Amino acid sequence: MGISKSETLTEKWVFKGGTCLKKCFFETYRFSEDLDFTLKDQSHLDDEFLHEAVSEVCDRVYENTGIEFPKEMRGFKLYKNPRGEKSCQGKIGYRGPVSPPGKNAPRIKLDLTADEILVLPPATSPVYHPYSDAPSDGITISSYSYEEAFGEKIRALGERTRPRDLYDVVNLYRNDDARPAQAVLLDVLTKKCDFKGIGLPTMESIEPHFADLAGSWADMLEHQLPVLPPLKSFLEALPEFFDWLTGIHQARVLDPFSGSDSELVLRARTGLIDGLDHARSAIDIIRFAASNRLLVSLNYQGGIRLIEPYSLRRTSEGNIILHAHNVDKNEHRSYRVDRIQGATVTDQTFIPRHQVELTASGVTSISDNPPRTSALVSKPSNAYSRLSSPRPSRSNRMGPTYIYECTVCGKTFRRQKQTSRLNKHQDKSGYPCPGRSAIYRDTKY
């Protein structure tokens, strides 16, 4: 919140990395220790500037939350990165109501760099903050677009081949509802690799690192996840991913479970769905398991069921139900959320029978919505050119039209001004939508 409200930093610091994926796209994603930013102004990599700008941010956060950021616990280390350019690692200590005294207080880690290429315009993204101190109008921040974040993760996988990069790439690929157009993602990746002076990652270039991935899989990921998925399932997903990325094969897309025509698929963040507060923990666990293709041990009405989770839906009667495959009975079952007493992720994987509609992206709420890159799918090269190099308007109305998408229901709005705030509105099925913030999607001229 502090950075997003800073007039000095908000347009110049672009949020990226694992924490960005968790806070802006997937709230049940892996935990990441760092806050990573690409700086659009290299002059910000200056010790005096950083201390002054961060002091302003810390003061604002203290005024709004009461969390203290002692000056003596702030530090910035400026250094030359492998490309010979200036970068910065910062640590900012803080004290909250339960923080330990003395020098052992927790610290926020910052990773700042200014020599990264931004292929696509930054997005204005909502920040997931499911706590009582959240501002009424939400929190937004300038971040990598989904396509940019995906391309950056593939580039990182090819350059350093760490467990978290493999985990991120496979998870982003599995999120088929938000999957970018193949041509657009490949174009983003190509430009990023060219900028770094490295070749495009391939299956052949990753395979020699399998032993290293196996040796560090648990050490690097186990503390970031509720349950560590087996490495094997992620390695087995790579051939299909690279075949899709290079255009050899189209991605395999499963049909969703048919269900009833009157059912409404729910993909919104659990904290924003009416009637789910009491089951938020269980649904978060189920969504995490679904995105990692792990079976769930479901405590339901006093009994334990081992299930493959697929879809969360609202019925015409107003009940919210979980569609799943009961492994023990080998048949489809639906479970009312208000009767779920608990859920536990297992380490057993499953191969989906239907489309997994539980990805906790918080961007799309109805299964037949256009994908987030629908404008890029039909004509990726033209759409990409339009994003990169805006053309003068030929219409009678002067100025561009900004397209924003509600973060809860996925409904789009055309704006004459750049603002992410939304008024009360109905979703595409006519239900009142609780969403009050939107994410930037496109500009029309």
Image (tube, rainbow, N blue to C red):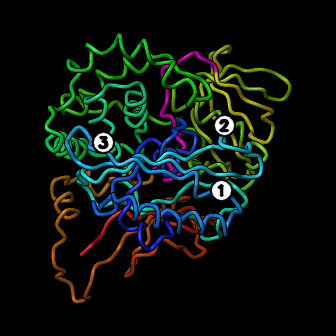
- Main SS of the magenta part reads loop
Name which residue type carries label 1.
Leu
Q: Distance between the residues labelled 1 and 2?
A: 17 Å
In the rendering, at what x and y percent does residue 148 appear? 31, 49
Residue shown at 66% from the left, 62% from the top: 134
Q: Which of marks 2 and 3 is in front?
A: 3
Left or right of 86 on screen, residue 359:
right
Left or right of 138 on screen, residue 343:
right
State which tag comes first along the sequence, 2 or 3: 3
Q: Is mark 2 on a helix, strand or loop?
A: strand
Q: Mark 3 points at which residue?
A: 152
Left or right of 275 on screen, residue 438:
left
Q: What element carries label 3?
A: helix
Which span of residues is magenta-colored?
A: 346-368
Q: Residues within 10 Å of mark 2 (few under 14, many from 20)?
A: many
Residue shown at 35% from the left, 65% from the top: 12
Q: Nearer the viewer, residue 78 or 234?
A: 78
Q: Which of 264 and 134 is in front in this view?
A: 134
Magenta region includes residue 435: no
Q: Residue 322 carries which label?
A: 2
Q: How crowded is mark 1: few (under 14 residues within 10 Å), some or many (20 or more)?
A: some
Q: Name the residue under label 1.
A: 272
In the rendering, at what x and y percent does residue 276 appear? 73, 48
Q: Do the residues labelled 1 and 2 touch (CB within 8 Å)?
A: no
Quarter of the figure with the N terminus: bottom right
Q: How far apart are marks 3 and 1 (CA)?
A: 30 Å
Name which residue type carries label 3.
Glu
Residue shown at 58% from the left, 51% from the top: 73
